[in-house]
Amino acid sequence: MTAHRALIRRTALSVTAGVAALVLAACGSDSGSGGHDMGSMESDSSPTATASAKAGDHNDADVDFSKEMIQHHRQAVDMAELAADRASSQEVKDLATKVKGAQDPEIKTMSGWLTSWGEDVPEEMSGSMDHDMSSAMPGMMSGTDMDKLEKASGAEFDTMFLTMMVEHHEGAVEMAETEKADGTYGPATKLADDVVTAQTAEIKQMNKMLGKS
């Protein structure tokens, strides 16, 4: 009996030792797994950080510039289209064609930015009331101004168009300078710089056509 009991005891101790070894191995495995999980979490956070960085490539100034300049450009295009029909000077007609040719593509570009940012593209203006609602922007003509331009013709139209477009361009330059100072989206600040360069040159050209320089 004594020998039998000793055998049972040794067997029990062996089993206990084996269980302990298995527990330790399992703990070691869990620890390793936990470390791997933490590593995975850190790795998973990287794309999020990258996405956040991309989301921060533009700011409110870029959004405001794009929305307002789209409306501003649309009015300039409307004025240019009137000039194509009503201007008496070929020089004025050529300038109007140049304005429309430059600003139509920029409208499409800025609309694309807004869409990619999840922002609404401003709706097309129609009627004097809508022009008046946007006249708070620098250089924008009121609905009354646009009505007068539409009713003019010949040399009177030429003078009125050039005078209004000088003011309109000056407003665009002011808006573009604000974007250059406050914006963070590279393509937007580059477009703003292009607006300043092109429209400043056109202001000088139009003033010369008006006999002011």
Image (tube, rainbow, N blue to C red):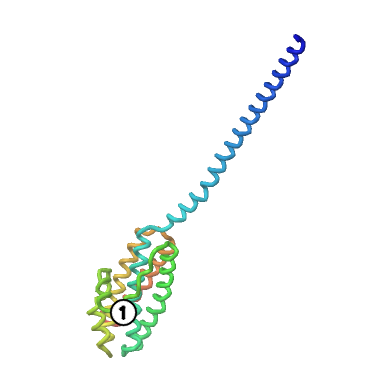
Classify residue 17 by image quadrant: top right
What residue is disc 1 on?
A: 206
Residue at the spot x=49%, y=50% of the render? 48
Q: What x and y, as percent, mark residue 67?
A: 35, 67
**163 relative to 19 in the view: left or right:** left
Q: Nearer the viewer, residue 63 or 180?
A: 63
Q: Residue 86: percent from the left, percent from the top?
A: 31, 89
Instruction: Give the amino acid at mark 1.
Output: Met
Residue 29 x, y percent position in the rendering: 63, 33
Q: Tell me the residue at 23%/83% (across/down).
A: 148
User: Would residue 82 be visible to someone looking at this image?
Assistant: yes
The C terminus sits in image quarter:
bottom left
What residue is rendered at 53% in x and 43% in y? Answer: 42
Local SS, label 1: helix
Mark 1 is surrounded, within 10 Å at the Cα level, by few (under 14), some (14 to 19) or many (20 or more) other residues, namely many
- Residue 200 in view, yes or no: no
Question: Quadrant location of residue 178?
Answer: bottom left
Quadrant containing the N terminus is top right
Q: Quick check: 64 above or below 167?
A: above
Q: Is residue 149 left or right of residue 195?
A: left
